Image: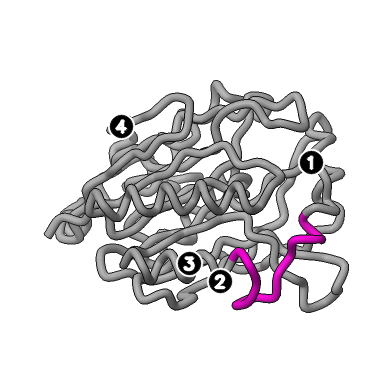
Amino acid sequence: MMTKIAIAQINACMAVGVNLLCLKRMIERAADSGAKLIIFPDRCALFSMKSSDYEINKEILGEGRIQDYLQKLSRDNNIWIIASGIPIVSEYSKEKYYLASVVYNSAGDLYEVYYHLAPTLPCAFQWTHSLLQDQEYGEMVKVIKTPFANIGLISTYDLFLPEVFRYLKKQGADIFAVSAAFTQDMGAHAWMTLLKARALENSSMILAANQSGIHEDADLLFHGNSMVVDHNGQLAQRIEMGEQLLYAEIDTKYFKNICFDQNPFQLQYRR
């Protein structure tokens, strides 16, 4: 049986309320189209250049304005939700927070949480370094088992780490859900190349949701270009800029028929 998945491209801002209304609009549109899962970009509920904004809006896991709203939307629309970059209170320090991908099932239950890994970035991304000073980081990546596929959760900086994808594949991931806030400064020319490489290395489909447009409080342009890349590393679908939904049809039986061992580009053949 085919399952429709929605990939949401948005331009989040500093106002959580505005972002939540955007998420509601996208979720309702996706559900009306028959989608069973929607994937949002990284930092979909809040994007700010100030660490203090994340600190103010951080929530205890399972509680809070953002999580309660997502829970209600998933239940009311009978849809799974992957929402990335939600600020969650650190259990080690009240002043610090995680950025997490939270997953809700169609019954509105908090199904899984992925605390984003620590990125390794060049000094050129000074704005990112300052923003991450008050952030805590997770130590485990996650594969979620849904009724339609086993999905590996990927955030922005994981895209630069091929071994993360390889590990998720070994843990049973059929496809990868990439939630990104990928700007032109981060190498827009490499965005599609990275996605294709990760798909080809693991013989797995990639569903990539990215932020799009100019951010209001910084000279940053989000690259957009959310896309679907098939297991052969071929571009299947893409949208360029603006707030849009992209749809992919997946078939669980299809994953079982992919001949994983015959792909010479896989990381298992590295030397």
Judging from the image, what secondary structure is the residue with disc 3 in? strand
Q: Are marks 4 and 1 in contact (CB under 8 Å)?
A: no
Taking depth in this image into account, of 247 and 65 the one nearest to the observer is: 65
Q: Which amino acid, by three-letter code, is at mark 4? A: Gln
Magenta segment boundaries in residue numbering:
54-66
For image coordinates 47% across by 45% down, the residue present is 270
Which percent across, then down, holds residue 190? 54, 26
Q: Nearer the viewer, mark 4 or mark 3?
A: 3
The kind of secondary structure element at disc 4 is strand
Q: Amino acid at mark 1?
A: Met
Judge the density around disc 2: few (<14), some (14-19), many (≥20) Cα neighbours within 10 Å.
few
Q: Amino acid at mark 3?
A: Val
Whether tag 4 and tag 3 are in contact, CB under 8 A, the answer is no
**200 up-or-down from 109: above or below:** above
Q: Is residue 58 magenta?
A: yes
Q: CA distance from mark 1 to mark 3?
A: 25 Å
Q: Residue at x 68, y 59 (%)?
A: 99
Q: CA distance from mark 4 to mark 3?
A: 24 Å
| Mark toward the viewer: 3 or 2 | 2
Image position, residue 186 (x, y; %): 66, 30
**Is 155 covered by the magenta stretch?**
no
Label 1 or label 2, whichever comes before in sequence order: 1
Q: Earlier in the sequence, mark 2 or mark 4?
A: 2
Q: Which numbered marker is on residue 68?
A: 2
